[in-house]
């Protein structure tokens, strides 16, 4: 398990809540108090091609348009085992996710354009162990 840092800032209601920053993966860097991550889902023509995305960090008030994705981690079967690879960044680092998450990303992936999304399993919760 990676190092965990508790941060609490009190300048606004958003910042007043404590949050954890995990730094156990090369995919993630620690977020600042006013930052969040978005995932840019790479476009492909072949639906069987591996899921690849790029994680980018933005200020809350300076970010591109994006879609917030909601889904059930365990799906109908309730299986929340992280066993399906999602590839991240220019070096294609492996991030294991649930099969439901991988299926959802396949469904969302466009053939011609990059799609920018926010999803908790990848953008907010890098280490759930």
Image (tube, rainbow, N blue to C red):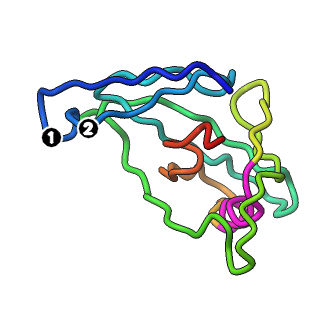
Which residue lies under the disc numbered 2? 17
Percent from the top left, x then y, of residue 107? 68, 68
Q: Which residues are magenta?
A: 97-107
Asked if residue 96 is positioned above or below residue 32 in the image, the reply reads below
Question: On the picture, is 41 further left or further right than 69?
Answer: right
Residue at horizontal 52 percent and vertical 23 percent from the top: 4
Asked if residue 69 is positioned above or below residue 127 in the image, the reply reads below
Residue at horizontal 44 percent and vertical 58 percent from the top: 67
- For label 1, the SS is helix
Percent from the top left, x then y, of residue 9? 22, 24
Per the image, is 52 magenta? no
Q: Residue furthest right?
A: 48
Residue at horizontal 58 percent and vertical 19 percent from the top: 3
Name the chief secondary structure element in magenta: helix
Q: Residue 24 lies in what quarter of the image?
A: top right
Asked if residue 4 is positioned above or below residue 52 in the image, the reply reads above
Residue nearest the observer in this picture, 92 or 47: 92
Residue nearest the observer in this picture, 73 or 35: 73
- For label 2, the SS is loop
How crowded pointer 1 is (Cα within 10 Å; few <14, some 14-19, many 20+) is rated as few
Which residue lies under the disc numbered 1? 13
Please state, as top left, top right, bottom left or bottom right, where the C terminus lies in the image. Answer: top right
Residue 81 circle label: none
Residue contact at pointers 2 and 1, CB within 8 angstroms: yes
Percent from the top left, x then y, of residue 44? 76, 53
Count the numbered circles shown: 2
Percent from the top left, x then y, of residue 83? 83, 52
Residue at horizontal 43 percent and vertical 24 percent from the top: 31
- The CA distance from mark 2 to mark 1 is 7 Å
Q: Residue 46 lies in what quarter of the image?
A: bottom right
Per the image, is 106 magenta? yes
How crowded pointer 2 is (Cα within 10 Å; few <14, some 14-19, many 20+) is rated as few
């Amino acid at each position: 398990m990676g190092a965990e840092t508790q941060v609490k800032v009190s300048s606004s209601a958003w910042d007043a809540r404590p949050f954890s920053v995990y730094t156990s993966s090369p995919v993630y860097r620690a977020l600042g108090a006013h930052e969040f991550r978005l995932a840019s889902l790479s476009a492909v023509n072949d639906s069987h091609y591996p899921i690849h995305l790029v994680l980018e960090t933005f200020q809350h008030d300076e970010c591109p348009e994006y879609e917030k994705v909601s889904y059930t981690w365990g799906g109908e079967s309730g299986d929340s085992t992280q066993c399906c690879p999602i590839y991240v960044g220019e070096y294609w680092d492996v991030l294991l996710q649930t099969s439901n998450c991988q299926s959802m990303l396949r469904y969302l992936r466009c053939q011609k354009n990059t799609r920018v999304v926010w999803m908790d399993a990848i953008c907010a919760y890098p280490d759930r162990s």
